[in-house]
Each structure stands twice: as C-alpha cells, then as structure tokens.
Amino acid sequence: MTLPELTSLEYLEIERCEPNLTSLLEISCLTSLRSLWIEDFPNLITFPESIRNPISLEKLYIRNCPNLTTLPDDGCLKSLQELEIAKCPQLAEKYKNKIEKDFPNLEIDWD
C-alpha cells in the first residue's frame, strides 16, 4: 500500500485498517508530517524504512500493537517531542531503557 503525494499533510491517524497487516505503508511522500498515530494493529511487526524521512515528525503515538517489535531508527526519534507507546509489550520491553537514556528530553508515555 502507498499513499498519494500528500506533501502538505501534517497529521495522519492509521487505525484498524487491516487486521492482518504486518507492516505499515510507505510514508516517504509525507514530508510535512508532524504527527503520526498508529492504533489497533494486532499483527503489525515493523515500520517501513521510509518513516525515517519525515524529519518534521514531532509526535508519534503507537497503541495496541502487541506484536510490533521495532521502532524507526534514531534518526526519526531525534525530531520527536512526544512519544506514546501503549499496549505494545514487545516495544516497551525492548526500547524503554534505551529511549529514556538516549532521549532524556523526549516526553514519553509508556501507558
């Protein structure tokens, strides 16, 4: 799946689109994206590589994705001001200490 060239889009919420989806769509065309909300994907495992590209990303919310095992690399996380990870036990176990240590100014909610 891909999105059209929505270069001025600033907010995107992806929720319960396809329960069997294991990876997110490519978002490299969303160069103005400031907020991304991902919720209720029980089989989601990975983010696309292109999530690194929107350096304007300030807020990332990930909720109820219990099989998600990876976050975008540090390049994406450096631009964030807020990060919420809720009901994603694998992410919390793998990243909680690292993110809190590497990004002390980031507002994080591990709900």
Image (spheres, grey):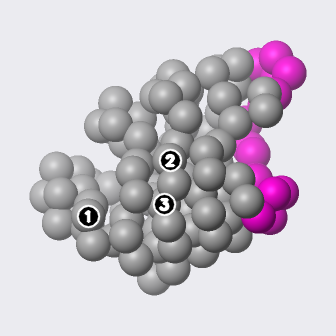
Query: Which residue shows up at 62% across the image and 63% down it?
Result: 43
Residue 5 higher or lower than 43, as above or below: above
The residue pinned by badge 2 equals 46
Choose the circle earlier in sequence order: 3 or 2. 2
Query: Which residue shows up at 70% across the image and 36% down it?
Result: 25
Choose the circle earlier in sequence order: 1 or 3. 3
Q: Which residues are magenta?
A: 3-19
Residue 71 higher or lower than 55, as above or below: below
The amino acid type, in three-letter code, at marker 2 is Thr
Q: What is the spatial separation of the Cα atoms under label 3 and label 2, in whole angstroms?
A: 6 Å
The residue pinned by badge 3 equals 68
Which mark, residue 64?
Answer: none
The residue pinned by badge 1 equals 94
Kind of element beneath mark 2: loop
Query: Which residue shows up at 70% across the image and 19% down it?
Result: 29
Rendering quarter of residue 26: top right
Choose the circle earlier in sequence order: 1 or 2. 2
Estimate how packed mark 3 is, as few (under 14), some (14 to 19) or many (20 or more) residues with alpha carbons within 10 Å: many
Of 37 and 106, the residue lying toward us: 37
